[in-house]
Amino acid sequence: MRVLYLLNVSNSSQLSADSGFTFADMLAPALTDAGAEVTVASPVPVGDTRVHFAPTTSPSTKYRARFDPGMDALVTLIRDRRPEVVVANQIEAAPAIRAALLEAGVDALIAGYCHYLPFSFTDTGVLELDPAMNDRGLGRSVLLAFAAGLAACDSILVHSSTAASWTTAAAARTGVDLGDKLHIVPAPRDVRLVRDPADITPPEGRATGIYNHRLYRHYGTARFTQLARRLVADAPVRLTVMDLFGTRSPERIRLDPSPERHLEELATTDGVTIASDRGDRIRYRNLLAGAHFGIAPFRPGCPWSMSVIDCQAMGLPVIGPRTGWLAEHIDDELLFDTDEQAVQITERLATDAEFYLVHAKRAYASTADLTPAVVAARYLEAIK
């Protein structure tokens, strides 16, 4: 099977902060091992030289990635590679891919992977647009473009049951019949970030938590900052917050300056340390290994979090708000609705060794089926 994998890299200068690239870097070699001939069309190649590389230009903004697919380049690429399956990692681009296939005279299937949902649903079924995609009221247009992409795909892949439910509901509301096109295929865990729980030592009365998520406003960073202050004040806890972006371009700061503002606020909070892996996965592993537990983001529309999986694969229990995919995936004893509950959970993790080790083992076990080989098999089955 010849697979053309179209990858939008939003942070080519900070690849360690780009979960889509990390996904491809793990998955493409595993697809190759399984017998597929894979070409990754991307601004940067994946690490395995067996995976073919077709260089592309990175969109300058998140809206260009959705509304400017570059038809001329698509047609040229498709004519050159003659794929049997085209993977659209930007769902909104799927209609343009379909049109490019027609123009190029190539009969290929389109598989769309919903890495990111520009919407979420409340517990009462209310559709909410993701504020990250709603600058100047563009959210409704992004939602409709997303729905058009779903309609253009032959197969649609999502990370989780929560993502499947939300995608199905959004499709129904926009008049798109998904039929039997929808498949749940989680992302692979990073093989460099796996640790046997047998090698873990529980904290002895004081624990270090790590928050390894992007500091955008729409990730609920203000809500996390509120919790961080409460934890370091009322629990035997110190926190490490990852600076995943470093110095961003003026263009990206203009579009959304919230990461810089939140980082400055957290850096002045007693008990909170700012750390950077500087794009080095070994350094990142060491930072995770130096922590005792992870904290999930407060993002309402969270259909998956690779950073949560990173912690769990390293045997770190992850605490999180009872919302979205987090409520589906994280052990119920580690979910909270209030800051007070979060304090109680972290106190127990810090002081109850048996409780801690049980959840370290459960965290690790929750990622056992996310090896690249297992995920690649599910992926190939879904895109046939």
Image (cartoon, rainbow, N blue to C red):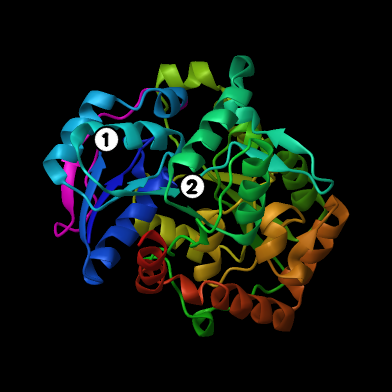
Q: Which residue is mark 1?
A: 102
Residue 149 % position (x, y): 47, 37
- Name the residue rendered at 28%, 26% in the picture: 71
The residue lying toward the viewer, choosing from 213 and 234, is: 213
Position of the N terminus, as image quadrant, is bottom left
Query: Around disc 1, counting alpha carbons within 10 Å, would you say few (fewer than 14), some (14 to 19), or many (20 or more)?
Result: few
Q: Left or right: where does residue 36 sit relative to residue 333?
A: left
Is residue 90 among what the camera can see?
A: yes
| Magenta stretch in the rendered image | 43-62
- Residue contact between numbered discs 2 and 1, judged by CB atoms under 8 Å: no
Q: Is residue 196 magenta?
A: no
Q: Outermost residue, left direction?
A: 80
Query: Residue at the spot x=36%, y=31% of the render?
Result: 96
Q: Quadrant of residue 153?
A: top left
**Measured from the top left, where is residue 27 in percent x and y?**
33, 60
Asked where in the image residue 34 lies, by quadrant, the reply is: bottom left
Q: Please state the horizontal and vertical placement of residue 46, each as a whole percent of the image.
A: 24, 51
What amino acid type is highlighted by mark number 1? Leu
**Mark 1 element type:** helix
Image point (34%, 51%), residue name: 280
Q: Amino acid at mark 2?
A: His
Residue at 31% over, 30% down: 58
Viewed as shown, does residue 132 lie left or right of 342? left
On the image, numbered disc 2 is attached to which residue? 115
Q: Nearer the viewer, mark 2 or mark 1?
A: 1
